[in-house]
Image (cartoon, rainbow, N blue to C red):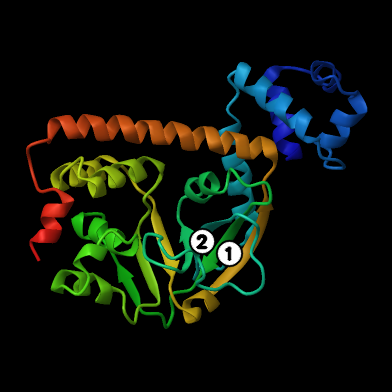
Amino acid sequence: MNTIIRLIRQEMGKSQEELAQMLGSSFTSVNRWENGRAVPGKMAQKQLYELSKEKGISVEKMIMQKIHEAVSDAHVDPSRITLYHGSKAGIQGIIAPISREKCDFGPGFYMGTDPYQPLTLISDFEESKFYIVSLSLEGLNTLSVRPDLEWAMLVAFYRGKMERIRGTKLYETYAQRAQGVDIVIGSIANDRMFYVLDNFFLGNITDKALVMSLSALQLGQQYVALTQKACDAVQIEKEIPLSYLERQYMKDISEANRAKGIELANDICRNYRREGLFFDELLDMN
């Protein structure tokens, strides 16, 4: 966090003494923050957040720079895939497939190629931790899911949206899709896509509108370790604590992306309201 404080001050064109005066603090405190010998309290971080917002300073870019530098410092083995994981209270014990049941591909250990998704996911939690991890696919059974209607239907199954057709051929098709698989590789339903998917499941937009949304958004990839064998192939490269200041900026990004998703879904709904099938109609076709 010390680097971010220094960069904010430099972007504002202020000295340490001037920043201290703006925060009602002391030169010594600001100097210690920037040298990494102390961490500002929550109130000072709130003031830094408000100042940087007021001055239009992009802390988001600073956070991403911090992560990219951490990846570089980690010197990940090139034979392994570099990924990101967010935890609301930190990883305790061994890595295991123990996420909540109704995730995109069921209970597992979720990792993404894009740091934004895990960062925004954990931004509300004070004890949250961000991890740079690596994964070796050697000896693992993998299932790659393309970002299309089949992906959405598989997500629907794991989120419990198909329960009313339990026991049917269609239900069993998706129930067996990931059987015997160690790793599922598929698109992340990010902040923008959550809203679009929810509208599809609720019957507000058709499959045509959904597919058009998928093609309009550049979704990152997620790797989901479904078995302990897959989790054992995951290695933590670096743990990165998140300050209050950083989490506030991630919350802003999450809210902005969700607003974009709402705007996109509404536009697509208007353009494709009469094309394609609704979710319930697809379920009734089995």
Q: Quadrant of residue 217?
A: top left
- Residue for badge 2: 82
- Tell me the amino acid under the disc marked 2: Thr
Q: Position of residue 81 (x, y in %)?
A: 48, 65
Q: Quadrant of residue 185?
A: bottom left
Q: Quadrant of residue 236?
A: bottom right
Q: Judging from the image, what secondary structure is the residue with disc 2 in?
A: strand
- Residue for badge 1: 76
Near-viewer residue (136 or 95): 95
Q: Is residue 142 left or right of residue 109?
A: left
Q: Is residue 98 above or below residue 30?
A: below
Q: Is residue 149 left or right of residue 242?
A: left
Q: Position of residue 82 (x, y in %)?
A: 51, 61
Q: Which residue is located at x 53 percent, y 57 percent?
A: 84
Which quadrant: the N terminus? top right
Q: Judging from the image, what secondary structure is the residue with disc 1 in?
A: loop
Q: Which residue is located at x 81 percent, y 19 percent?
A: 15
At label 1, counting other C-alpha atoms closer than 10 Å, the crowd grade (few under 14, some 14-19, many 20 or more) is: some
Q: Position of residue 203 (x, y in %)?
A: 20, 45
Q: Which residue is located at x 61 percent, y 22 percent?
A: 53
Q: Earlier in the sequence, mark 1 or mark 2?
A: 1
Q: Position of residue 29 (x, y in %)?
A: 89, 30
Q: Is residue 84 above or below residue 63?
A: below
- Tell me the amino acid under the disc marked 1: Val
Q: Is residue 264 above or below residue 160?
A: above
Which quadrant: the C terminus? bottom left
Q: Is residue 108 above or below residue 210?
A: below
For the residues labelled 1 and 2, say whether their Cβ atoms are less than 8 Å apart.
yes
Residue 14 numbered tag? none
